[in-house]
Amino acid sequence: LPAAKLINIAETNPEAIGQLRKSKDEPSSGVLRVRVQGRVQRVAKQGGLMFVTLRRGLNLMQCLLAGELAKTYDALTLMRETSMEVFGELWEVPAGAHAPLNRELHADYFRIIAVAPGGDDAFTNLVPEDGDPNTLLNLRHLTLRHDKPSAVMFVRGVLEGAFHTAYKEMDVKKVSPPALVQTQVEGGATLFKFDYYGETSYLTQSSQLYLETVLPSLGDVYCIEKSFRAEKSLTRRHLSEYTHIEAELDFITFDDLLTHLEAVICRVVDLTLEDPVAGELVKKYNPEFKKPSRPFLRMRYADAIEWLREKGIKNTEGNDHVFGDDIAEAAERKMTDEINRPIFLTHFPVEIKAFYMQKADDDKRVTESVDLLMPGVGEVVGGSMRIWDYEELLAAYKREGIDPAGYFWYLDQRKYGSSPHGGYGLGAERFLAWLMKLWTVREACLYPRFMGRCTP
Ligand code: 4AD
C-alpha cells in the first residue's frame, strides 16, 4: 500500500487530500491515500458494510469499512467514542447518498487508538441526548460531546470574538479588572464573601466601578470577565458565575448610550452570523431567528407598568402592578414575548435601582437606566448613566446605608475631573440563549455554576 498522508477530517484543500475518486472503474491517478484520526460518533451497518462516522471537534467524516475489515473483532466491537485512525482513499459519495463534505473515506486499514467502554458504561447509556437534565449536568464532561452542546460552545466562542471585533471597530479599549474585590456594585444580597488573608472580600458582581476609573486614562473601555452572584433562587436565567461583557463610555448622554448599545448588538449579531459555521448552527437550532432591526423599541418603566396593568399581568403578590414595583421575571418575560422584539426599558425608579445611577433631569423619581429585554429570555443588558457629582454620590451611599470609606477610589473619580458617563453589562449566557433559543442559560455554559452545583 502507498504511504498514507495524515490529514485533518475537515481538510478540503485538493493538494492535501488529492482528487476524490468517483468510482472503482475510474483510474486512481491523483487519488491520494490518506489517514485521519478521530472518535467514533456513529456506527451504522448495511449488509456487509460498516459506515463509521468519525468526529474531530465539530467536524465529521464518514468512513466505509467493507469486506474483511468489517468482519474484524475491532470492527465488530466498535463503540461510540472509541478513538481510531482510518487509512484509505477519499471517494465522492454516490448520487442520492449524503455524507459530510460530500465524501467518504474507503478504508483499506484502520487502527484503534483507545477503546471506549460498551455495556452499561456505554456512552449513549450514560448520557442519552434527551436524558434527565441533572444527570446530564453530573456528566457534563461527557454531555459536551453531543452535537448541540458542542455547537453552543462553538457559537459562544465566535460570539465572544465578535464582541472583541465590534469594540475594536468602535475604538473601545479592552482592560481586565480584578475578580477579587472589597466593594459591592449590585447589592449585598448576592455577594459571595471570602476570607482574603484575614480581610473580608468578595467575588466581583460587576467590573463596572473599575471600568469607570479607567475612562480618564484609556477613554472608552470594555472587559469580558466573570461576574459572580450568590443567587439564592433557581431560575432559567440565573447563574452564580457568568460571563459579563461590560463597557463604559465617557462624555456621553443617555441617548448616546442607547444608540451605542443598538450598534454593538447589531454588529455582533452580523459578525456571528457571518461566520460560516456559527451562522449555520444558529440557523439549525434557531431557524426562526430574525436579526433585530434598529431602532429598538424604547419604553419607559412607567409605561411598562401601565401596559402590565392593562394586560392584567399581576405582580409577585398577585396584585396589579403599581409605580415602584420591581417587574419580576415572569411578568417581564410575558411582556417581552408578547411584544416580541427587543425592548429598551428605561427610567426605572431610584428605589429599585443601584446606588450609582444618575437621576433623570425631567423626573427626579427615576434614573437614566436601561434594561434591554429580548424575546425568550427577558433582560440581557442592564445599564445606566452614572452619578458624576461628588456630593450626590455621597448622598446615594447614605441613602443605601453603604459606608463610602472603601469606595475612596470610586469617589476620587468624581473629584479629579468628573464627566457625564455611562455604561452597561451584558450577560453572555443570556445573549447566547436568545441567539440560539436555549431553554436555560445553563446550556450556554461550559460547566454551569448555580445554587447547588459547583461540579464537575
Ligand atoms: O443588571 P446587572 O446586575 O447590572 C450590573 O451588574 C451593572 N453593574 C453592569 C454595568 O453597568 N456595567 O447585570 C447586568 C447583566 C444582566 O442584564 C444579565 O444579562 C446579566 O448581567 N446577569 C446575569 N446573568 C446570569 N446570571 C445572573 N445571576 C446574572 N445577573 C446578571
Image (cartoon, rainbow, N blue to C red):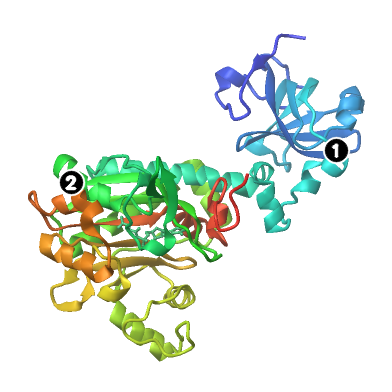
Closer to the camera, 157 or 234? 234
Q: Quadrant of ligand 1?
A: bottom left
Asked if residue 314 is positioned above or below residue 376 in the image, the reply reads below
Give the x, y percent position of residue 93: 71, 34
Q: Quadrant of the C terminus?
A: top right
Mark 2 lies on residue = 215
Residue ID at (38%, 77%)? 326
Q: Give the left or right position of residue 413, taking residue 307 as reference.
A: left
Give the x, y percent position of residue 197: 40, 40
Q: Quadrant of the N terminus?
A: top right
Distance from mark 2 CB to nearest ligand 1 atom below 8 Å: no
Q: Give the left or right position of residue 114, taking residue 354 as reference.
A: right
Mark found first going from the N terminus, 2 or 1:
1
Asked if residue 156 is positioned above or below residue 191 in the image, the reply reads above
Q: Residue furthest top?
A: 2
Residue ID at (61%, 48%)? 149
